[in-house]
Image: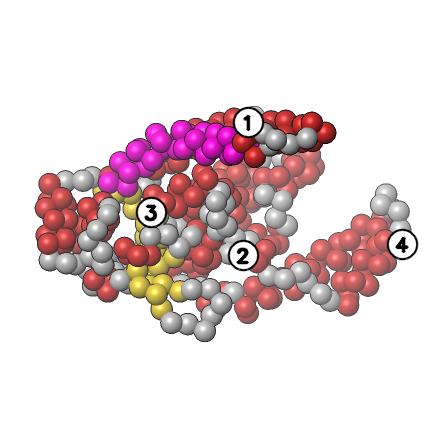
Amino acid sequence: MMYAFVDSNIFIRVISQGRPGCELQRFEDLVALAEGGVIRLLVPEVLTLELEKHFRLLPRQFESHCDKLTHSLTKATEDAWNEIDALKVGLLDQVAGYKRTKVAECEKMTSRITEFLGATHLQSIPLTNDIWLDTQRRLIAGRMPNSKGSADQDASIIASIVAFFRQANDQEARLLFCSENVHDFAVECKSDAKDRLFALHPLIQSDLPHARYFVNLETMLAFAKGYEALPEPDDEQIQLAANMRDLHDVDTDEYWTFQKIVDERIAKQVADRYTTEIAPSLPIEVYSARAELATAIRELLRQCRGCPTWSERSEDKLPKWLEHVPESLVPYTSLPNMVRIRRNLEEYLRRHQEM
């Protein structure tokens, strides 16, 4: 089973959008993978307590920073010419508008994340007396990379995860550990790669299943990528068919004949490249999850098309329910997309069965 832990600073980064790699879409992908059972997200109670504190302060922090900027702009333009007064007013209006928008977005996203972390399909880990005692033992024995600052919270997170795996007894478990807090959880690995690489600190790794360390959601969820991550196909036959298509009016049969050739050629090239360039590097559990989802989606499509209420109009609406992924490329799309497509088709089938 593939397990994952996502630290509080990552969820805060999703809200603040202060750094690439934790965009809202990455969070939605994490939600889809957890809902679809592809990963089991571990949620120690100490994490939710930390977030409760941070989420309560975030709106005021946004307001405070915006107010500081407003004050700085006002002070910097005290002696400005009247001729640029409109610029000053415009800048101050922009800051005020940004503050209102950001505070509203912050409140919306904190509720969304809190609701997600309370979902029953996530693995919550209560903060028990035994875990707290193990936390203190870990700190006293120096089994944490850093014993300053928020050491109690960090050690409690590790003690919670260790306690879970001790009870789970999953010999094939893998752990994805995602945190910006490299100073307290990780060691940097020397690498010729452009991006810095980190590993879970040996003092922590020794008590856990094999883990991989990530500093943002984008790198953690790289295993879930699909054909969308491949470069655009570049093929003479595709270009020839596209040129022939463009010679005809969109309402003619010839146009759609050549469009079909373009689509089929692109799909084949994309599928072949995915199979040779991405699939061989996938962990076995990811490969199995993709196969199970593809089988489930094929069966749902078969059942939908077998409904007495299925019609040409139903077929025309199908792309929306397939997340606008061409049907032939569904087995090669990203894992979050596959989870969403299965969920969509379950709903589409339910609607037809109820008609």
Instruction: Check if residue 342 falls in the magenta segment.
Output: no
The residue lying toward the viewer, choosing from 230 and 27, is 27
Which of the two discs, 3 and 2, labels the residue nearer the N terminus? Answer: 3
Could you give the CA–CA distance between mark 3 and mark 2, rounded to whole angstroms? 25 Å
- The amino acid type found where label 3 is placed reads Asp
Is label 3 in a helix, a strand or a loop?
A: loop
- Tell me where residue 95 sits by quadrant: top right
Look at mark 1 in the image and give the residue it sits on. Answer: 96
Residue type indicated by callout 4: Leu
Say the numbered circle drawn on residue 247. 4
Q: Which mark is residue 82?
A: none
Q: Tell me if label 3 and label 2 are in contact, CB under 8 Å.
A: no
**CB atoms of marks 3 and 1 within 8 Å:** no
Q: CA distance from mark 4 to mark 3?
A: 55 Å
Q: Is residue 306 visible?
A: no
Sequence-first disc among 4 and 2: 2
Q: Nearer the viewer, mark 3 or mark 2?
A: 3
What segment is highlighted magenta in the picture? 46-73
201 vs 256: above or below: below
Q: Secondary structure at mark 2?
A: loop
